Amino acid sequence: MSDVIYERCAGIDVHKKVIVVALRVGAKVTIRQFGTLTHELEEVTSWLKDNGCQMVAMESSGSYWKPLYNIFEMEELPAMVVNAQHMKAVPGRKTDVKDAEYVPARRPDARSAAFVKRTY
């Protein structure tokens, strides 16, 4: 069993039209879905901050994570993008909700985090 690093963290599975968020607070997990328009991304950010989220780990196989990551960065919400190849190892049948739940349940480390290049 791995050590608890973040008591309040979120896993996000990002797609073109929908974002599935699993917010873990202690042993309780709350699942919500959001759209991908700017005001909806801001709603995700507000919800996570209102719940005291300490770290966000998101999985995306495309570039759909970038707008959300930029908003998190502007709002000073710590976030990492995890390697989509590592997420393919999720045990059981793969669904967006299971992906979102699995991300905060595992211990994020340098092998699972992807490099995010700053462009400014």
Image (cartoon, rainbow, N blue to C red):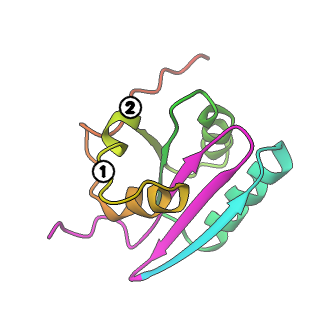
Q: Is residue 27 in view from this perspective? A: yes
Q: Is residue 35 left or right of residue 82?
A: right
- Up the image or down, 83 lies above or below 35; here it is above
Magenta-highlighted residues: 1-27
The residue located at (50%, 56%) in the rendering is 95
Residue 32 point in image, percent of width and height: 65, 67
* Count of all numbered marks drawn on residues in the image: 2
> Which secondary structure, mark 1?
loop
**Amino acid identity at mark 1:** Pro
Residue 89 point in image, percent of width and height: 29, 46
Residue under numbered circle 1: 108
| Classed neighbour count for the residue bearing mark 2: other residues with Cα under 10 Å, few (<14), some (14–19), many (≥20) | some
Q: Magenta segment: does it hold 5?
A: yes
Residue 1 point in image, percent of width and height: 14, 70
Q: Quadrant of residue 73?
A: top right
The residue located at (35%, 42%) in the rendering is 88
Task: Pick the residue in front: 7 or 23.
Answer: 23
Residue under numbered circle 2: 114
| Classed neighbour count for the residue bearing mark 1: other residues with Cα under 10 Å, few (<14), some (14–19), many (≥20) | some
Q: Magenta segment: does it hold 42?
A: no
**Residue lying furthest front:** 93
